[in-house]
Amino acid sequence: MAIVEQNAPGRGEGLLDDDRLFPADSRTRAVARGLYAHVRDLPIISPHGHTDPRWYAENEAFPDPAQLFVVPDHYVFRMLFSQGVKLEDLGVPTLDGTPVETDSRKIWRRFAENYYLFRGTPTRIWLDHAFSTLFDIDVGLSSKTADFYYERIAERLAQPDYRPRALFERFNIEVIATTEGPLDDLRWHEKIAESGWKGRVVTAYRPDTVIDPEFQDFRENVERFGEISGAEIGNFAGYLDAHRIRRGFFKSHGATATDHGHATARTENLDRGEAERLYQKALKGIVSAEEADVFRGHMLTEMARMSLDDGLVMQIHPGSWRNHSQSIFTRFGRDKGFDIPMRTDYVRALKPMLDAVGTEPGLSVILFTLDETAYSRELAPLAGVYPSLKLGPAWWFFDSAEGMRRFRELTTETAGFYNTVGFNDDTRAFCSIPARHDVARRVDCAYLAQLVVTGRLREDEAHEVAHDLTYRLVKEAYRL
């Protein structure tokens, strides 16, 4: 405790530099400061993410520091695992129920003694921001300060001001979108609506479990899909009807977007007979890997056609080899830090869908990538001409100051600012949301400042662009 009292001025100066992520030279930094001052306190629009709607529905206290910051966060435990820390020792639950560490203080101490591993990473920025601004901690996390951190955070989490709804309001979130599968009954969204709370939490339709023939339990998922939609899913036409019904159900719970996490960006535009043939093989579990990919690709085109009818914005998140470690997947399940980026083709892959509907008025498709080499060569030129395409922000492995800067450098010259959609945090880590948006605002302001001092943008224009990138574009792109 003495260490903290000596070093803690009380407002986070020990962890956060006021000029973090701004340019080093004084002239450009001054412009960046001015731009940032006008967007720093704008409301947060979080149009795509994976926070749990149950948090907002039940509004119960978060359990403890380890369960909030360590156990559910693959950004945290993948780094620790890479340095030899076992997932079991971090409390990550196993599928077969074999024992894992359940003492949250021990988990926290293990995290704290390895916190140095995050030096220079975006995770470090996000965590330090939360520790400083939410919990008024001004000394760095280490084995020496682990217990102080744990006790301070646990004490705050027990207070009403740290319940999910109170934090939602404290973070100045105007709207947040969660992501649910097509079999979800959206009970938590219904409970939020019935509660009378004014916070806006909407859902998004992610149909991967009933679109990907290689997804675990695909046939059972489709059968359940038919049951809850009331559609006849024995044929392809009825299967498409089930999607239309479920999309309508999600829209009734606030959805403005769909989300598609396919391994590739492949699209196809099959005739109805071929689509029926592949669908029947998928139901029987006898499709080849190539046929499964063709079916997924065709369904992206079908989803785009449905978006023309119901107005849902379409998000495509391709290019991740998910669950790369078979042993970890078998023991711990999905989303345990072993998703790895892959090279992705967009020009050829998207052409069937774009030929079918790419110039139709009203279609809005937001493209993401984990392949930065595609930005200037493929994605920016595509978004720079097709009215249906917009570029999502630097995503996942590139959700960093450097990644965001590269995104602007590689896309602006061809696609401009107005074929992009602002920022989304795509996170499960609730307390990191303000930090992630703050990083994006600082990086964009730094980039705009550079354009100003090099004579490529007037300062009044830079102020307008900064506001658009922070607030207006994301609302318009996601129809929020």
Image: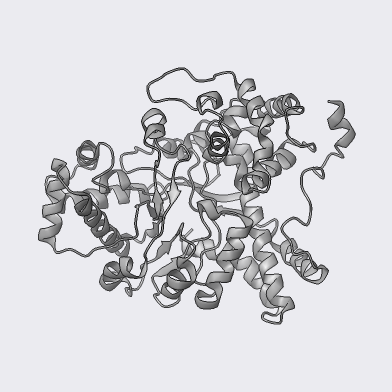
- Give the residue drawn at x 12%, y 54%: 276
Judged from this view, the residue extending furthest toward the bottom is 455
Left or right placement of residue 376 versus residue 43 in this view: left
Residue 112, position as x, y percentages in the image: 68, 31
Judged from this view, the residue extending furthest toward the right is 6
- Give the residue drawn at x 13%, y 47%: 281
- Give the residue drawn at x 18%, y 49%: 288
Determine if residue 61 is in view.
no
Q: Is residue 7 above or below residue 449?
A: above
Report the colour scheme: one colour
Q: Is residue 462 above or below residue 334?
A: below
- Give the residue drawn at x 66%, y 57%: 42
Question: Toward the viewer: 162 or 6?
Answer: 6
Residue 468, position as x, y percentages in the image: 60, 67
Residue 283, position as x, y percentages in the image: 15, 43
Q: How many marks?
A: 0
Q: Is residue 181 above or below residue 89?
A: below
Quadrant of the frame with the N terminus: top right
Left or right placement of residue 207 versus residue 189 in this view: left
- Which quadrant would residue 365 be assigned to in this image? bottom left
Q: Is residue 359 above or below residue 18?
A: below
Determine if residue 148 is in view.
yes
Residue 82, position as x, y percentages in the image: 54, 37
Question: Toward the viewer: 145 or 338?
Answer: 338
Question: Toward the viewer: 186 or 9?
Answer: 9
Left or right placement of residue 428 versus residue 431 in this view: left
Judged from this view, the residue extending furthest toward the front is 84
